[in-house]
Image: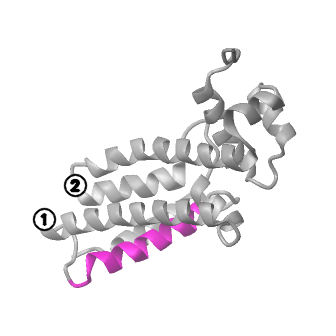
Amino acid sequence: MPRPKEFDVNEVLLKAMKLFWQQGYEKTSINDLVEHLGIHRRSLYDTFGDKHQLFLQAVEVYRNFVSGRLEKIINAPSARQGLRTLFDFIIDGMEDKPPGCLVVNMSVELALRDPEVDAKARESFERTEGLITDLIRKGQENGEFTNMRDAGELAAHLHSTMLGLRVLVRTSADQKKLHRIAETALALLEV
């Protein structure tokens, strides 16, 4: 009869998510995981499979975590406020969380050589771009934003800007500069 787990699987996945987010996949060793997660190597393998499988599970935890934040953006009082909140979320980050975006980090590090990571990244990017498109359409319908360009084209541009900002927040870039970049991107939507 298998022994009961001596740890909370969800708590361990949260810790793994944060470690991979901070250090990246390649830099995070099994020893780092065992030490940071506070579980035995055998328990790690028995519960999560190998490092790659643990990473993919941690990415799912991250995506669910971020989805909760995106709900607030979708339900913002105005489309402009929703997009501004999204930019602020990207630039200012969250307390006690690493800067940047785990999905962007994993894409840059692994997507070209790992089809599973590439698929997860594309799915996340498509979901985010779809959210931005919906917000722009909402803004176009209520007169907040220009109708001179297609909402999808504008969303693709804004999303590209957001991806760049997600990389820059992991550097020593000045946050005031990053907010100016966001304001310039939002200015493209003006009527």
> For the stretch drawn in magenta, what is the main secondary structure?
helix
- Packing grade of label 1 (10 A; few <14, some 14-19, many >=20) is few
Q: Secondary structure at mark 1?
A: loop
Residue shown at 54%/64% (left/top)? 119
Residue 98 shown left or right of residue 191 in the figure: right
Q: Amino acid at mark 1?
A: Asn
Q: Looking at the rendered structure, which numbered label has been put on residue 142?
A: 1
Q: Looking at the figure, which quarter contains the N terminus? A: top right
Q: How many marks?
A: 2
Residue 101 magenta-highlighted? no
Seen from the viewer's position, the closer of residues 103 and 147 is 103
Q: Looking at the figure, which quarter contains the C terminus? A: bottom left
Residue shown at 26%/81% (left/top)? 150
- Check the image and name the residue furthest to the bottom: 148
Q: Secondary structure at mark 2?
A: loop
Residue 42 shown left or right of residue 9 in the figure: right
Seen from the viewer's position, the closer of residues 42 and 128 is 42
Residue at image mark 2: 78
Please provide percent x and percent y for residue 155: 36, 72
Q: Are marks 2 and 1 in contact (CB under 8 Å)?
A: yes
- Packing grade of label 2 (10 A; few <14, some 14-19, many >=20) is some
Please provide percent x and percent y for residue 168: 63, 64
Q: Is residue 129 visible?
A: yes
Please provide percent x and percent y for residue 175: 57, 57
The part of the chain drawn in magenta is 148-167
